Structure formats: C-alpha cells, structure tokens
Image (cartoon, helix red, strand yellow):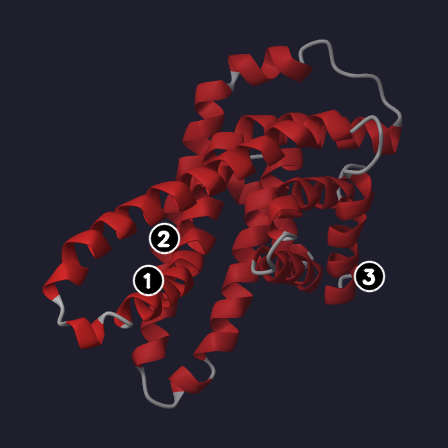
Amino acid sequence: MSNPFTGIGYFFQGLRLITQPGLRRYVMIPLLINFTLFAGLIWFGSSQFEVFLQWMMPELPEWLQWFEWLLWIVFGVAALLILFYVFSLLANVVASPFNGLLAEAVERHLTGEAQDADGGWKKMVSELVPTIIDELKKLLYMAAWSIPFLLLFLIPVVNLVAPFIWLAFSAWMMTVEYADYPMGNHGLRSDEQKRRLGDNRMMSLGFGGAVTLATMTPILNFLVMPAAVAGATAMWVERWKN
C-alpha cells in the first residue's frame, strides 16, 4: 500500500540493514567521510571565531567582558544550523560514489543475486566523475525549487502553512536524493525515477519525512545517509524492481 507509514518503515529497515555483517564495510567509508567533514567544519569554524573574539574583546569595556560567553552560545546555535545544511550537502556529494556501492550490496543481500561482473568497485571508479556530476545536478534541482517554496514564507496567511509545505518539499527531495542510488544502478534516468516515486507519492513522502527528521537528530544524523540508501534500496527491491 502507498501510505506514509510504509515509507517510514523502509527507513527503519535501512537502519537495521546497515548493521548486517556483509554490509557494514560499505557503511564505514561514508561514515568516515561524514565524521571527517563534520569535525573539519567544526574545527575551522571555531578557530576562526576564536580569532574574531581575540580581535573584538579587547575593544570592549571591562564591564562587557561577560559578553564573550553569550557570543559562544550564539556561535554554537548558528553553527548547528549551518552545519545541518552544508554538512548534508557536502557529505552527499563526496560520498555519492560509495552510496552506489552500498545500494548494490544491499540489493544483493535482499535478493541473493550474484554481483554483476561490471559492478562493484570497478563500476564505481569508471563512473566516478558522472556520479559526482549527477549529484551536483540534484543539488541544482533542489536549489531551483527551494526559491519559490521559500517565498511562501513572505506571503501573508500563506506563511501560516508554509512550514508544512516546506516539510513536504524537504521530504520529497530526500526521497529523490536517496532513491536515485538503487534506481540509477539500473539505468533509470531522473524523470523516470520521479515518475515512479510520484506514483507512490504518500509512501515516498513518508520515507523522505523520516529521513528529514532523522537528519535533524544529533548522533542519529551520522547514520542517516547509509540508512537512507539502504532503506531506499529495500523500497526499490520490493516495490519496483520486478
């Protein structure tokens, strides 16, 4: 049945799948990429902010020196918001070739089929540049559609429902993002992928909604990318492969 709870279930199925012995090795590289990017951005941002404070604080009168700890709190909140978007975008671009491998491995795990002779690491290396280009195209697609949806927040009355519209849009984009890996492994182009997802729109929105909420959850957001790839692959195998 095409309902949101089915889609949510596929995301949690993805969380279970990435713990399987035969699949864990495909998860470690994307997780390492996630952690490295996250730690690097935090280190760079905090070091630059500390330089800014060292320049600014001596200029303030002594009775305003307490202001420094408040600025660190503001920086922490801003950093979390910025990292939520920048980190997700960078991690998806850098890890996209490995996500195709993970989708391939999950599909073999679920179907028991042998690996294609042209698949695996050989395929990843040969398609490295096209894969990254496709990922950048998805980001441009998301950016192009984000503008009109963000403008809804400026329209009186409509802005009351704008957050819910934005959540639905984000859920759709998450599904488009991660369903691309198993579908792309079978040569389906972007338009055909969106058509199939649109035919099961409520299930797709349920899956993307679970991914969106998990992305905003500390600690869990490190596992979102591999879990979403695995869950989207399970959805592909059960709903569209045959």
* Point 47% across, 69% down: residue: 166
Res 180 visible: yes
Specify the quadrant of the image occupied by residue 151.
bottom left
Q: Position of residue 208 (x, y in %)?
A: 62, 57
Q: Which residue is mark 2?
A: 143
Q: Residue at x 34, y 54 (%)?
A: 144
Q: Which residue is mark 3?
A: 1
How far is disc 2 from disc 1 in space, using C-alphas? 7 Å
Q: Is residue 62 left or right of residue 229?
A: left
- Looking at this view, name the residue that lies furthest to the bottom: 157
Q: Residue at x 84, y 34 (%)?
A: 20
Q: CA distance from mark 2 to mark 3?
A: 31 Å
Q: Where on the picture, by quarter, is residue 72?
A: bottom left
Q: Do labels 2 and 1 touch, CB within 8 Å?
A: yes
Q: Is tag 2's residue or tag 3's residue first in the polypeptide sequence?
A: 3
* In the image, residue 41 above or below residue 151: above
Q: Element at badge 2?
A: helix
In three-dimensional space, the C-alpha distance between marks 1 and 3, rounded to whole angstroms, equals 33 Å
Q: Quadrant of the N terminus?
A: bottom right
Tell which of 181 and 189 is nearer to you.
181
